[in-house]
Image: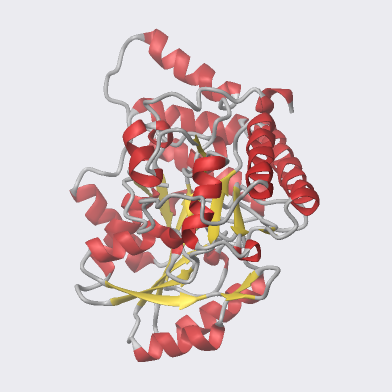
Amino acid sequence: MTAFNSASNYGEHAFIKSKPEMLESIYNTVDVFPYWVADMDFQVAEPITQELNRLVERGVYSYEFNEQAVFEALSQWYSKRHGLSLSSDKFVQVPGVLPGIALLLRQFTNEGDGVLIHTPAYHQFANLVNKAGRQVVNSPLINDGQSYQVDFSGMEQQIIDQKVKTMIFCNPHNPTGRVWTPQEIEQVIEIAKRHDVLIISDEVHSDIIFEGHAFTSLTSFDYDKVIALIGSPAKTFGMHSISNGYVYTNNHELFEAFKTNIAAMYLDHGNALTTFATIAAFEKGEEWLDGMLAYLQDTVKWISEFAELRIPQLKVFQPQGTYQVWFDFSGLDFSEEELKNVVFEQAKMGLTPGGWFGAQSPNFMRMNIATSRDNIEQSFTALADAIDGFERGSQTSSTCCDSGASKSCC
């Protein structure tokens, strides 16, 4: 716990989350603590650092192609960690999860096609679809007051009405923290089967699963139109700026077509630092991951207990996975401008505005909790004090960005 509580360097201006120009564009101030980007303040597992140091100290950077060793490490990891049987011969390496989705959309959909996403949704999904010249089809999740559920009938009607042929399915879900059950996934797949819908499954958060829940990959179901972005050390091991993405499908035709296309663009291999750091992470990083998960769960517990005591009007959605916590501020009865004033300007908490994730979430915000408990406690104390001392009509107009058009990858 001590190692994770000593998280530092969050003020490093080379990091996207702390760049003054980014903070200014989002919050109209640089004086906020950045909780808006889904990366970690934690130092990575020691085996990763050791491997990177080995490569740097070697001082020679001749060409190295060791992707198969990465695929074997991934296959063994998912077998041990999740009970998945994944062939090391069915992975395709891509430059990252977002580039992977972008490449899949361009190869397997046509311009103008409808692509379904479940809202509130990670804002870059809509950006990817729009930039590819496809049409975003929003399928709102059902908020039952405690958690979020898939609206299966509504989703199917959207597929029919909008002639949807592709769906981006986020599993676990960002920003709500839902870890979808096998029964829920089965219903999604049955609907996809009925309408011949290709599913691109973003499973990058698959290792950030909390006690009482289990990750289920869409690749484990009997449906041959599933392509999963199943592996990346980015979210699991904090290797956000030195990681690739790994695409997996059981469909031989889709696999060969995608592999051929990626190879034709010479995108199918990574640099040596990323390659060997990834192998070290998946082969030797499990103990670090278990410690990090325990720390995150304690953080969620602390936030929930503090909110119940000091901010009972704040709805904290208990994450089942991911290191994002989704908040509903509507119980405070603030206007949109009042909420921004209290959270951003007075409490100085750089949370992600709910509007980024869909038009139906103006009173919601997302928080990245992969930082030290000291930071969390300081911020929530400031938030509670700001709420207690708030005077209506005292706030100034904010120009905070709510469009989700951030340059951030997270």
Residue 28 point in image, percent of width and height: 37, 43
Q: Is residue 9 above or below residue 399?
A: above
Look at 61% across and 42% down and name the residue there: 369
Q: Is residue 103 left or right of residue 293?
A: left
Quadrant assignment, res 113: bottom left
Colouring: secondary structure
Q: Is residue 122 left or right of residue 324?
A: left
Residue nearest the viewer, comparing 181 with 385: 385
Place of residue 31 in the rendered image (x, y in percent of width and height, measured from the top left): 46, 33
Is 306 placed above or below 198 here? above
Q: Residue 35, can we see it?
A: no
- Work out whether residue 232 or residue 159 is closer to the camera in this orientation and state it: 159
Horizontal side of residue 63 vs 307, given as left or right: left
Query: Looking at the rendering, which quadrant does residue 218 occupy?
Result: bottom right
Viewer-closest of 212 and 90: 212
Q: Position of residue 227 (x, y in %)?
A: 42, 64
Looking at the image, residue 170 lies above or below residue 349: below
Residue in the image at 66% along x and 33% along y: 378
Residue found 55% across the figure and 41% down from its top: 346
Q: Which quarter of the image is occupied by the N terminus?
A: top right
Q: Is residue 262 in view?
A: yes
- Which sits in the foreground, 381 or 189? 381
Seen at 33% across and 43% down, the residue is: 25
The picture places residue 299, in percent across and down from the top left corner, at 72, 41
